[in-house]
Image: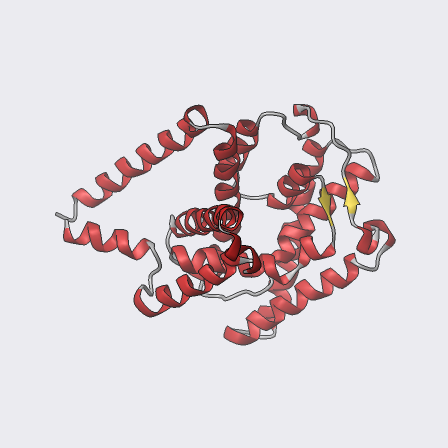
Amino acid sequence: MTSRVPGRALLLLGVGTLAALAYPLLVPGYLVTVGMLVLFTAFLGQAWNLAGGFAGQTSFGHVVFFGTGAYVSTILHVSYGWNPWLAWPVAVLAGGVVGCAIAVLAFRAGLRGSYFALITLAFAEVFRILANSLPITRGGLGMLIKADPRLENFQFKDPATAYYLALALCAAGGTFYAQRYLYIDPTIAFGVDKSVEMLLVTMVGGAGTVFGPLIGAAALTGINEITRALATVIPALKNVQPLSLVVYGVMLVIIVARLPDGLAGLFKKTTRHA
């Protein structure tokens, strides 16, 4: 019975990969963009999951890596004329250097548990203040990237191209975000809400699992799109802003109380019973 589980898992992985590759070919452009958001949010969650889920080191400041990548690539592109494709690996390297520096300082001091979580939050706040103050980041005005939708500029007219790029991520999300939305500022790059989003999608989907962040991203992105659509159709819901956060909160309470392994736990139970 147990020997068949890995084969079943590989089969599901293969089917899921094929479905993900075929998805943009089967749905309209709006849903391709939604799919891209799911993949990007899953990437953010998986970044947190590596430390918080698998290694057991809860972080409230993972956004510092996202923001570092976003600012490094944008500064190189906007201020120094670098092609964003060339700035991308430099941004990844910068994020790695920041991660190593934080790890050395935190673990050399023997910080664990809530102390580690708080120090990561402090680092993210320090970086937000620096980005809000330094001339090279243009402070609170943020940095605007010129719209020029060509492949060589890391900008895409076709949403399917952005979808496939998000599907391929395992790092460098800050650069992807900056080139996708053509603007960053200190709050976007280092705000605590992005760290909360990383934690939330992982906890909802299932911390310490491979597919938990993807499941959580699909659930939360779906809720966001549905509640936004309902708010435009039902007048009474327009005053509940943002409605999605209310639903997120209720969902998180239910999952913490009934599904400690997140939504991924439902699939484990189904496999176990099968």
Q: Residue furthest left?
A: 1
Q: Based on the displayed image, in which of its 4 quarters is residue 148 positioned? A: top right
- Left or right of residue 65: residue 198: left
Q: Which residue: 64% across, 37% down?
A: 180
- Left or right of residue 74: residue 138: right
Residue 93: percent from the left, percent from the top?
Answer: 66, 46
Residue 9: percent from the left, percent from the top?
Answer: 27, 42
Q: Which residue: 57% across, 59% down?
A: 239
Residue 54 can be seen in this image: no
Which of the colour schemes (rainbow, by chain, secondary structure, one colour) is used?
secondary structure
Q: Based on the displayed image, in which of its 4 quarters is residue 25 positioned? A: top left
Residue sitting nearer the eye, 255 or 151 = 255
Compared with 120, 9 (above or below) is above
Compared with 80, 242 (above or below) is below
Residue sitting nearer the eye, 199 or 69 = 199
Residue 206: percent from the left, percent from the top?
Answer: 38, 57
Q: Which residue: 65% across, 24% down?
A: 151
Residue 8: percent from the left, percent from the top?
Answer: 22, 40
Count the numbered circles shown.
0
Q: Based on the displayed image, in which of its 4 quarters is residue 13 positioned? A: top left
Residue sitting nearer the eye, 161 or 227 = 227
Compared with 249, 77 (above or below) is above
Compared with 74, 212 (above or below) is below
Q: Residue furthest right?
A: 135
Q: Residue furthest front?
A: 235
Residue 242 can be seen in this image: yes
